[in-house]
Image (cartoon, coloured by chain):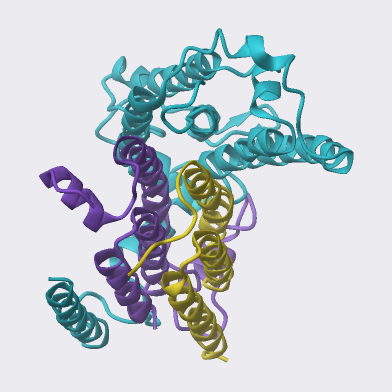
Amino acid sequence: MIIYPLLLTAYLFTIALVFTILAIKEKDLIKAVIYSAVQSIAYAIAFGVLLAPDILLVYLAVGLGIYPVIILYAISRTRRFEKHG
Amino acid sequence: MVKVLKILAITFLVLIILFTIYFVIEDVLGGSPKPVIRELGQFFLDNTYNIYYRKWWSGSPETVTAILWDYRGLDTIFETTVLYIAIIGCMVLAYKPLANILKRYEKEKHGLTLIVKTTVKIIIVLIAIVSINLALRGYISPGGGFAGGSAYAIAPLIVIAGYSIYYLLSMGYSLSKSAILRSIGLIVLVIIAVIPLIHLGYILQNQMKTYALFPGYPVKIGPFYIGGTLIFMNIGEFLIVSMEFIMIFILISLYTRGGEES
Amino acid sequence: MAIATISIALYGIIVKPNIIKKIIALTILGDTANVLIIFLAYRLIPFPKPPILPSLKPSMEELSKFMKSSVDPLPQALVITAIVINVAVIAFLVFLAIQVFRQYHTLEYNEIIKLKRGEQV
């Protein structure tokens, strides 16, 4: 009984790790933003499992609604693809 | 040159991984989760709504909001200052006088399809109701000023995406009105923080303490529970945070590439 | 596991030359650090509870049960402040990135260094 929340957070962290690796290796910047948003969803569920309701509400509004939008504005005013690297 | 940088980065990262594993497992900084939490956290849990021993109590059953606004109120005031300075920096880079932009509105009536527009109209009302509810009941249920302000700022963002930015500006939002509302929120915070100085208390005092003789804000007015200073602080913080984010969105959507006529 | 995410985000900041990719990796780093703090403040008993008292007139027994079975509230208050400060910093960095593009017409870090020295790309 003690171990069920810890197993759940380990599972969520593994999902987040997979999506960060995909986000950093990607050359198309819009897909990288979407992978980072999916990883934000995994972290929001982790905040709920660790019993912190106040932080969950702030993090949903900020990490899902403000970060990808501002970065998408920056991409639309500059280039979309990354050159080398 | 790039190869040397990569090798340096990888060795640096391996060292960081080893240090953090050592710190987390060997219990140096308080380590992994335990059955007994730290003494400082236990002190806050014992004393925030202890009716039977009123020496250190604050007036609300919500521990996190009481820590943010009553026990560590100066941290929150400095964080509001940091947001303020960041907005000033953004305005230096991207400010445009808005008078000659509104003249072009009749020429460009674009936006997305009709389905998106009706959905946007329904969602805006729901977002406004939920965010004001989160902000005003910050002393009883989780939420508070920050969650309410951030959720309210999503509504003009959806209007910018569904309609265009010119529609939002002709609806009545503008940079100077947002700045005035944010200053009103800041004035509310400062007045409520400074009043205890009259009775020889200290700034941001909530209830009576043995060394500071201010009688304390009321916890109950009539049949309604008010959490001392907490409800007014939450209203002020809601105004500040929502207007800050709206100003960021207006500034960045009018910031075009260089060289085009704007 | 969170430590691996922090290290991969740091690798992304240092090695990748595009400025917007660096900003994305910076947001990932900040969020992972906040989750790690909340994970270290959990209480390992069979049925923990969130740090909110569920009634306005608690009896003595409810109060002592709440004191013994609730999660640590102090890191949660500090993490809320940290999230809002992160938003302010990243918003300002995005404005600076657009300004850099307006002046140099490129966003790769190697080419900006060459343009500043005076050579051609």
Split into 4 quadrants, where in the image is the N terminus of chain C?
bottom left
* Residue name at image x 55 percent, y 42 percent: B144
Task: Return the residue nearer the eye: C24 or B123.
Answer: C24
- Residue B137: image quadrant is top right
Rendered view: A18 above or below A23: below
Rendered view: B134 above or below A11: above
Q: Is residue A60 left or right of residue A79?
A: right
- Residue B21: image quadrant is bottom left
Visible residue check, residue B18: yes
Task: Return the residue nearer the eye: B167 or B100.
Answer: B100
Task: Return the residue nearer the eye: B184 or A21.
Answer: A21
Task: Return the residue nearer the eye: B254 or B232.
Answer: B254
Which chain does the yellow colour mark? A
What tint does the image give chain B? Answer: cyan
Q: Position of residue B102 (x, y in %)?
A: 63, 12
* Residue name at image x 53 percent, y 38 percent: B145
